Image: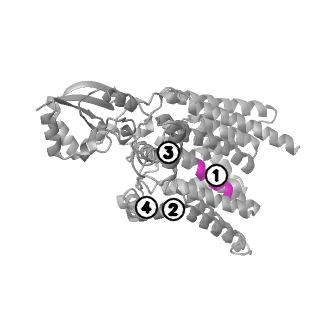
Amino acid sequence: MTFIRRRLDFLVVTGLLLLAAVLRFWNLSHLGLTHFDEGSYTMAGRWLATWGREGWFFQAGQAPGLFPSLVGASLWLFGMHDTAAIAVSVVAGALTVGLVYWIGLNWFDRRVGVLAALFLATCEYHLIYSRMALTDATFCLLFWAALAALWAGVQQRRRNAYWLGGFLTGLAWNTKYHGFFPLVIMGIWLAGKSLLEWRRGGRLLDAMQLPNLAWAGSIAALAYLPWFLSVVFTVGYESVLRGQLEHSLMRGGLLVTHPATFYFYLTHWASLPLLILAGAGLIMLLLDGRPASRFLILVVAFFSGSLLLYLSFPRLLLPIIPALCLFAARALTWLSDRARRRSRAVLIAGSALVVLWNLADARQVLLLRTDSYREAAAYLETFPEPVLSQLNKNFYFYEGRKKSLELRWQDREELERLVGTSPSVIVAVDPIIQRLEAPLSWFERHRPEMELLRSFEVRMYEPVYYQGFDPWIGFDNLPRSIAPAVPGRTRIEVYRLPRQ
């Protein structure tokens, strides 16, 4: 019987991983880099893949070094192409689907595992970040893997599971600076559990769990230590802390992001049936007395609460999506159990509705081409003239042997000398120039003399537009220095500037 169950689990996981991989690899050759941070990670990856000949060193202010290192390994193995970098997120996203099945199976039952994995495999929110060279899909995988391992350690009192959870937490910490959250969440859980036991007349602290958690924390800290030391002896760790504070406590007030922001994000990139079922599932889990239900709610409450203290970015909410899929799956199985004779029909119809609705919402995501910057770079390579650029950082991954001169790093006198001595120069800009005062001033001064040669529409996923501001305000009510990229109006423009 055990052999049959294991074989069934293997077949189910294989099918779910295959579905998740097909959706995430779909149309991969038409994907490119569109996000500013993708430039940081891919250029650091290029630096590793070329042994320092190209690209640039890790930028500590963006994220720790694990994800750029994975990108570098992929570029080294599969070639210097943007799809090799994106493939890291593709694989991480597909593996997360398999992990959610395992969590649903072990925390609830097989039906919850299958349904939650199906919902996540087809969810637009998760698909978007699984098709970008950002840290978020990888972090989502490691965050939930660490929680699953720590939970197994607590429930089964297995020291090796604690050690694995600590190591996975260390990997998550090396992916994002809040990667230590699994240990904090587990610490809160154990503290609350111990307090309840004490109030019932038991011991305040579990003699076994506390040392195991300390071991897990030590392993996580050791895994993070190399990155910590590398930052300390280069840019200084205080610069990283200052950057985090500037996005949180230094914004003024306790709540930096309004809770309604989460509603905006979820209703835009998660399907309506999934959200309705997730809400119902949350209520059911609140009434459910099993420990796994309460722990899942604690994870969502803690993570969501921490995001309220930080500047609004859609990608930060991604680790909540697997939990919503588990909530929705639990609600659907509960409804199925109440249907009795029509139990199977309710389960099939409900899951089909969510999956088909998810796929309908995700259709545009799967068909969208995001290779505008790659097209622009190929076009700029055709010009013999010098090229001056002020483009999103991701563009510079695409440059070949001929490098452009980025305006923000050039002395104004040198720029004028170049324009005055060359027959003509090519100038390429995108909306990011609106955030840079000096390059914008130079560009606007010379713009009347420029000839527009070509304009590329920048095609990118909708969440990329909402970076660091309240999405309810609306683009027309924000200065372009805050929201330079506007849906439908984001373009790369290439000009020719003749000799002055």
Residue at 86% x, 43% y is: 3
Mark 2 and mark 1: Cα distance apart in space: 22 Å
Q: Secondary structure at mark 1?
A: helix
The amino acid marked with disc number 4 is: Val
The amino acid marked with disc number 3 is: Gly
- Among the two numbered marks 1 and 3 on one chain, the one whose residue lies closer to the N terminus: 3
Q: Secondary structure at mark 2?
A: helix
Q: Nearest the camera: 156 or 260?
A: 156
Mark 3 and mark 2: Cα distance apart in space: 18 Å
Residue 353 sits above or below residue 442 on the image: above
Residue at 35% x, 29% y is: 376
- Among the two numbered marks 3 and 2 on one chain, the one whose residue lies closer to the N terminus: 3
Q: Which mark is residue 231?
A: 4
- Among the two numbered marks 2 and 4 on one chain, the one whose residue lies closer to the N terminus: 2
- In the rendered structure, which segment of residues is drawn in magenta? 141-149
The amino acid marked with disc number 1 is: Ala
Dot 4: within a 10 Å radius of its alpha carbon, few (fewer than 14), some, or many (20 or more) residues?
Answer: many
Residue at 54% x, 30% y is: 362
- Among the two numbered marks 2 and 1 on one chain, the one whose residue lies closer to the N terminus: 1
The residue beneath circle 1 is: 145
